[in-house]
Image (cartoon, rainbow, N blue to C red):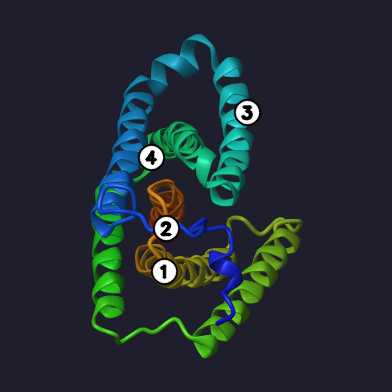
Amino acid sequence: MKQSPLFSNIQTGEAVYDDVDHATYKGITVKTVILLLISVLIAAVVAFALPTILANNPMTFYVTLIVSSIVGFIAVIVGRMSERKAKYASVIYAVCEGLFLGSLSAIVEAYAPGVVATAVFSTIVLFAVMLTLFATGVIRVGSKFRSICLGLTLGAIAIVLMVSLFSLFNVYKSQTYFNIMIGVEVFLVFYGVITLSFNFAEANAVVAMGASKNAEWSVALGLLVSILYIYIEIVRLLALIAARSEK
């Protein structure tokens, strides 16, 4: 049977792994939780110290944020392409993302109190719903589903380009701008939620194929990227709703 390109980097080889050496759902879950905790702890520290950091050395902070974003992006690519490097790459990404999440959360929370807690709760609920739908077979990642998701991906790219062009005009204070941006964010949240299905399907694949333990880190990294993406888009959506209500 021809292997899907999505899982082509999974190294199963010819060896038969025992219960200790092969990937398991428990191992994937534990590693995902570890990465989430790293991001959350870093974010909490940054959010708490952000006023002091900005007051004392804002330029260094901004440079660090930019560099960490670039490093985090590279870490995702490396971690998803190389199982042997996935452990280190995923931890690096979790740290880098924690810096960004802490900054974003602190700034938005200062402007619209309660957004962060709502975003965290919403992310957990959406993740639980998608996991339930996938586990019960309501959502199946087949060829038709992949085609739909490809269309959503192209749609997301088109929307981002449209918003970039839209931002060239001085309409940031208009109701039209907020309405359009809220619609865009709703679509991007939906897109992020749908991508969780591919993460769950990948987890099933690595366990079913008896992949090595290193594959757990790669899958956990993919889950982390999707979860944090959903959280970020929900925060942006709630911030836009709060801004519109003030108009």
Give the SS element for disc 1. helix
Mark 2: give few (<14), some (14-19) or many (20+) Cα within 10 Å.
Answer: many
Q: Position of residue 127 (x, y in %)?
A: 30, 64
Q: Position of residue 206 (x, y in %)?
A: 41, 63
Residue type at mark 3: give it.
Answer: Val
> Cα distance, mark 2 to mark 3?
33 Å
Task: Tell me the quadrant of the picture where the C terminus can be found.
Answer: bottom left
Give the SS element for disc 4. helix
Identify the mark nearer the N-term, 3 or 4. 3
Residue type at mark 4: give it.
Answer: Ser
Find disc 2 in the rendering and name its residue: 211
* In the depicted structure, whether residue 135 falls above or below residue 99: below
> Cα distance, mark 4 to mark 1?
34 Å
Find disc 3 in the rendering and name its residue: 67
Q: Are marks 1 and 2 in contact (CB under 8 Å)?
A: yes
**Can residue 224 be spotted in the picture?**
yes
**Can residue 175 be spotted in the picture?**
no
Name the front one of labels 3 and 4.
3
Rendered image: mark on residue 114: none
Name the front one of labels 1 and 3.
1
Name the front one of labels 2 and 3.
2
User: Is 173 on the left-hand or right-hand side of 167?
Assistant: left
Find disc 1 in the rendering and name its residue: 205
* In the depicted structure, whether residue 236 falls above or below residue 196: above
User: Is 39 on the left-hand or right-hand side of 73?
Assistant: left
* In the depicted structure, whether residue 159 falls above or below residue 47: below
Name the residue at 42% across, 35% down: 98
Identify the mark nearer the N-term, 4 or 1. 4
Q: Of all residues shown, which one is farthest toward the bottom?
A: 144
Find disc 4 in the rendering and name its residue: 105
Residue type at mark 2: give it.
Answer: Ala
Name the residue at 24% across, 82% down: 136
